[in-house]
Image: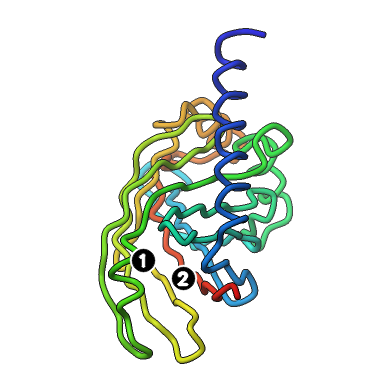
Amino acid sequence: MNTLTSRAAAVTLALTASLTCAASHAAWRVDGGQSNFSFTTTKAAMPGAAVLDEVQTFRRIDGSVGDDGKLVFDVDLASVETNIGLRNERLKDMLFKVAQYPQAVFTGTVDMQRVRALRAGESIDMDVSGQLAISGQAKPVTASLRVVKLANGALSVGTRVPVVVNLKDYGLQDEVEALRVLMNLDVLASAAPVSFTVMLMPQR
């Protein structure tokens, strides 16, 4: 096993352990049916052409917040939806390589004292820092969030501003370039603003 493969395996094991631990002591768990996750791609077909921004989504997301504030949030990369079947397959196979790296995972810690102090209908803004792992590489990320407490005890958590994720930070610049060439584009940005709204249901 080479060094890169070993490092990727170690990251995967660490994330799996985090997911298992958080799930077993979850105070809230993601309701995927009431949550959404989107990212914006930027491209230009030819030199001098207008830049086109398109909003894409992932259909399956999961995660939990533990009693200790540990947050684990994961996105099923195979659930990417661009409304073009061939493009979906290219992103899954060429960019994300979902057979090897099926999920993007964010792990962090939430200030539970502030969250538990919320009354129904109240909201707070908070910055949550953690690690985002894509393709076996983890990088620090900070998300500016708004947390709203609902009457049933659930939490609605959404981005106040998009989180910009640059795939070059995860060693995927060659994959982005290969897609650009295959799609015959002049420009295909490697950075994408990410936005989400997640419904967290209380676990009793």
Reply above or below: 97 against 74: above
Q: Are marks 1 and 2 in contact (CB under 8 Å)?
A: yes
Q: CA distance from mark 1 to mark 2?
A: 7 Å
Residue 181: image x %, image y %? Answer: 56, 32
**What sort of colour scheme is used for the picture?**
rainbow
Task: Work out whether residue 140 or residue 23 is closer to the camera in this orientation and state it.
Answer: 23
Residue 23: image x %, image y %? Answer: 61, 56
Is 137 displayed left or right of 147 in the figure? right
Q: At 60% across and 60% down in the image, what residue appears? A: 61
Task: Work out whether residue 139 or residue 44 is closer to the camera in this orientation and state it.
Answer: 139
Task: Work out whether residue 54 or residue 167 is closer to the camera in this orientation and state it.
Answer: 167
Q: Quadrant of the N terminus?
A: top right
SS at circle 2: strand
Callout 2 amino acid: Thr
Asked which quadrant contains residue 115, the reply is bottom left
Q: Which residue is mark 2?
A: 197
Residue 135: image x %, image y %? Answer: 56, 33
SS at circle 1: strand
Q: Which residue is mark 1?
A: 159
Mark 2 Cα-neighbour bin, 10 Å: few <14, some 14–19, many ≥20: some
Reply above or below: 86 against 38: above
Q: At 49% across and 61% down in the image, what residue appears? A: 65
Q: At 49% across and 38% down in the image, what residue appears? A: 133
Callout 1 amino acid: Thr
Is 142 displayed left or right of 85 in the figure? left
Residue 184: image x %, image y %? Answer: 56, 38
Mark 1 Cα-neighbour bin, 10 Å: few <14, some 14–19, many ≥20: some
Reply above or below: 9 against 77: above
Reply above or below: 41 against 122: above
Point out the tag, 1 or 2, that comes first from the N-terminus: 1
